[in-house]
Image: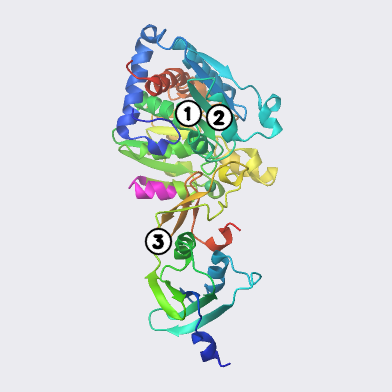
Amino acid sequence: MRQDHIISAKQLSRADIEEVLDRAADIAEDPGAYADRYEGTLLGLLFFEPSTRTKMSFSAAMKRLGGDIVDMGTVESSSVKKGESLADTVRVVEGYADALVLRHPSEGSAKMAGEFVDVPLINAGDGAGQHPTQTLLDLYTIRENAGFDDLSIGIMGDLKYGRTVHSLAHALTNFDARQHFVSPESLRLPRSVRYDLHEAGAEVREHTDLDEVLSELDVLYVTRIQQERFPDEDEYREVAGEYQIDESTLAAARDDLTIMHPLPRVDEIAHGVDETEQATYFQQAHNGVPVRMAILDLLLGGDR
Amino acid sequence: MSDHELRVSKIRNGTVIDHIAGGQALNVLAIVGIDGSGGDAVSVGMNVPSDRLGQKDIVKVEGRELSQDEVDVLSLIAPAATINIVRDFDVVEKHRVERPDQVVGVLECPNRHCITTEDEPVQSRFEVLEDGVRCEFCDTIVREDLAELIVD
Ligand SMILES: [Zn+2]
């Protein structure tokens, strides 16, 4: 992979993506072969907003490669609270670590930070922007379960602010995929993402009702609709209820549907669905470690 | 002074921006950073009949030559404009504006969650699209009211 940083899914070609997925599959098959590969290597974790899972999965990935982590800690206890700029923070921490992982509430933060450092920097979520490593583990899961040929995927929930959705939509333009976006009108894809999909010639449909498309889907990717996006709670309840999946919803779905969700969930997917063959979201979450190991391996040196 | 005289009155040294789309002259002045307080003599003709545009605006600024940056941003709202640099009553340079691929440090991103709107040592950067601009940091696309985004 010829990348210095992983900032956006837009920068990833099909070859880049397949290289990561192949490496991840190789790691998953024989993790022992990678166990000491990065002994003495330190990964710096800069999480400016809480994300226990993403952070744990990066830590686990680095440690399973034989390396270790240095962690900025919570924002409340750090110098960031004292008003230090992000540009200064990354330039300082670059001296402590061999690669950096950044989670930050501002859109474009990873892109900016990447311009200030020479060590590899990985975007682990920038506001409503991008979350490319989530996308790579999503793609890994899709390839395992549905493959990339003639793929019909439904992406449902908060499409406006959902960074995992934006990254996934960009990445899927590399494949033979029909993308169906299902959301309330107020949470449809942002103009910039629709623009990119159009430019890429992607086959895209927008829906407000899952029933319009459910029966033809290979994959249904569900995201959470956040209450804080709505001015009042009633409006939220009205909308959110329409985008919940339970076993009765799935009566119209194909038996081999793959249901995904970039956890954590609240109540978008009823617990009854967990026992179905279609539920894939825990497998998807577990895939985070080998995929992030692959990303680190390729960024830090590949086949050294 | 008649209206006709005002429109064609010559300037000694400065810039004449011609062929601005009708109604955009005040936005052009905003881009050039002229609000009348600097003491420059400025004449503005609005909705003047034009063969090329039907109606056009024209702006003349005494004592001021536009920088390339200013011309670049000008091109975003006045793509048909011509810039005439005048020295000692003669037009010494005349060129059409050209849309740049990128404008740097000139527009402020309207996305209030964009990192470029925070106190960071970074200039705003916009890719110029066929019909608008796009923030290179947060990807926000802006098509309307570009003049309102011009950095003071
Ligand atoms: Zn921006």
In the rendered image, residue A200, in percent from the top left (x then y), is placed at 34, 46
Name which quarter of the figure residue A12 lies in: top left
Q: Which residues are magenta?
A: A194-203
**Residue pictured at 45% horizontal, 61% vertical:** B68
Quick check: A2 left or right of A290?
left
In the rendered image, residue B39, in percent from the top left (x then y), is placed at 64, 73
Q: Quadrant of the N terminus of chain A?
A: top left
**Residue pictured at 41% horizontal, 77% vertical:** B91
State whether residue A37 is above or below residue A226. Answer: above
SS at circle 1: strand
Name which quarter of the figure residue A213 lies in: top left
What amino acid is found at the position of numbered circle 3 in the picture?
A: Arg
Disc 3 is attached to a residue of which chain? B
Q: Residues within 10 Å of mark 2 (few under 14, many from 20)?
A: many
The dominant secondary structure in magenta is helix
Question: In the image, which disc is placed on residue B38?
Answer: none
Q: Is residue A12 visible?
A: yes
SS at circle 2: helix
Q: Is residue B47 magenta?
A: no
- Residue beneath disc 1: A121
Name which quarter of the figure residue A109 lies in: top right
Question: In the image, which disc is placed on residue B99?
Answer: 3
What amino acid is found at the position of numbered circle 2 in the picture?
A: Val
What amino acid is found at the position of numbered circle 1 in the picture?
A: Leu
Most foreground residue, A218 or B41: B41
Question: In the image, which disc is placed on residue A90?
Answer: 2
Q: Nearer the viewer, mark 1 or mark 2?
A: 2
In the rendered image, residue B23, in percent from the top left (x then y), is placed at 53, 75
Q: Residues within 10 Å of mark 1 (few under 14, many from 20)?
A: many
